[in-house]
């Protein structure tokens, strides 16, 4: 039940190829939070980060509380 989807991480332009991604599944409710780790290719320098969300279905599938990037 529910909709799942994919979040992709892109640098400097929403049309650039993704440097990482992670799948998001149904948590059982809009306020039922889960931490989902993802892998991103090594990056140096300063960049603008774009997150793209896709599910292949017309329904909303994610309620984002926060994103955290670290080394």
Image (cartoon, rainbow, N blue to C red):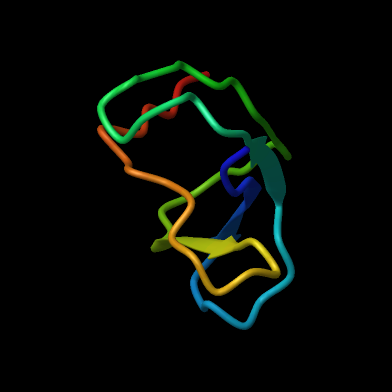
Q: Position of residue 56 (x, y in %)?
A: 70, 69
Q: Is residue 63 above or below residue 37?
A: below
In the displayed structure, does residue 38 sit left or right of residue 70?
A: right
Residue placed at 51% from the left, 78% from the top? 13
Q: Residue furthest front?
A: 1
Picture mark count:
0
User: Depth check: 22 or 16 in front?
Assistant: 22
In the displayed structure, does residue 39 sit left or right of residue 10?
A: right
Q: Position of residue 59 (x, y in %)?
A: 49, 65
Q: Quadrant of residue 36?
A: top right
Q: Residue furthest bottom?
A: 15
Residue placed at 63% from the left, 38% from the top? 1
User: Depth check: 60 or 14 in front?
Assistant: 60
Q: Is residue 13 above or below residue 7?
A: below
In the displayed structure, does residue 13 sit left or right of residue 68?
A: right
Q: Quadrant of residue 54?
A: bottom right
Residue placed at 43% from the left, 46% from the top? 62
User: Depth check: 59 or 62 in front?
Assistant: 59
Q: Position of residue 11 (x, y in %)?
A: 54, 63
Q: Is residue 5 above or below residue 67?
A: below
In the displayed structure, does residue 36 sit left or right of residue 29?
A: right
Q: Position of residue 68 (x, y in %)?
A: 37, 27
Q: Quadrant of residue 37?
A: top right
């Amino acid at each position: 039940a529910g909709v799942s989807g994919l979040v992709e991480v892109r640098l400097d332009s929403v049309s650039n190829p993704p440097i990482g991604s992670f799948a998001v599944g149904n948590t059982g409710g809009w306020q039922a939070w889960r931490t989902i780790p993802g892998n991103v290719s090594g990056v140096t320098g300063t960049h603008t980060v774009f997150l793209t969300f896709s599910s292949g279905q017309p329904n909303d599938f994610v309620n984002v509380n926060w994103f955290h990037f670290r080394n």
